Image (cartoon, rainbow, N blue to C red):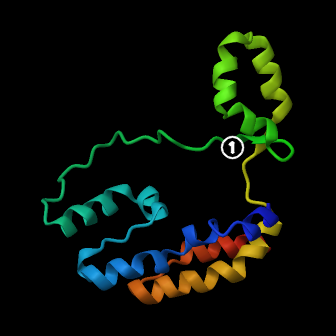
Amino acid sequence: MVTAVAEDPEYIPYSDYATQLSPYLNEFGSESIYALTFEDLVDNMEKEVGGIFKWLGLDVLDKFPSEHGVWNKTPSTIQRFKGKGGLQRFRSSGLWSLMSPLIPDSIKQSIKSSIAENVEKETPRELLKYLRPIILPKIESLENMLQRDFNQWKVSCDDQDS
């Protein structure tokens, strides 16, 4: 996984929020940007939604709906494709779309089980060790830009080192 992240120039920029926000802050100013982390929203949804309402100039809800469940949580076990993904790429191809209706479900299930395996969802330790020196300065840059702490992200990195 470290190799994939290191070799693909798309991965790390998605986590560089300072670089992503900078043009918007320059163009529209900090008063026009409301920055919210997913972690803050999950930890205290009522407070954070109230903050958004206030920022938008709307009346804050007197009573927040008590029923706000989680609908899209990633399961603790996920499917990972084996090998270099050739069969998965074929399974996503136009040719497979044409062939698939002609193939019995039992054979499709057998193919699926041969190209995928269920694994525990976790970020590999070696990947975190690789990313930590790259991501921490980006977090610090974001903190300086927005004048707020993102300690929950730093703790996540620290927790993995122990």
User: Residue drawn at (12%, 59%), measured in percent from left and top?
Assistant: 59
Q: Which of the 4 quarters of the picture holds residue 47?
A: bottom left
> Residue under circle 1?
76
Label 1 sits on what residue type? Ser
Total numbered labels: 1
Which of the pair 31/157 is nearer the observer?
Answer: 31
Q: Give x and y (percent) for residue 12.
A: 63, 71
Which residue reaches farthest bottom?
Answer: 144
> Which sits in the foreground, 89 or 19?
89
Is 138 drawn above or below residue 13 in the view shown?
A: below
**66 and 156: which is toward the camera:** 156
In the rendered image, the vertical position of residue 65 relative to residue 104, given as above or below: below
Label 1 packing within 10 angstroms: few (<14), some (14-19), many (20+)? few
Q: Quadrant location of the C terminus?
A: bottom right
Given residues 2 and 51, the one toward you in this image is 2
> Residue 154 location in percent, x, y?
61, 77
Residue 10: x and y in percent read: 62, 66
Answer yes or no: is residue 121 visible.
Answer: yes
Q: Secondary structure at mark 1?
A: loop
Task: Judge from the rendering whether residue 7 lies leftward or rightward of residue 15; answer left or right.
Answer: right
Any part of residue 117 in sight:
no
Q: Residue 153 appears in which quarter of the rendering? A: bottom right
Q: Residue at x 60, y 44 (%)?
A: 74
Q: Which quarter of the rendering shows the N terminus?
A: bottom right
Image coordinates for residue 88, horizontal then vertical, percent: 75, 37
Q: Residue at x 87, y 45 (%)?
A: 83
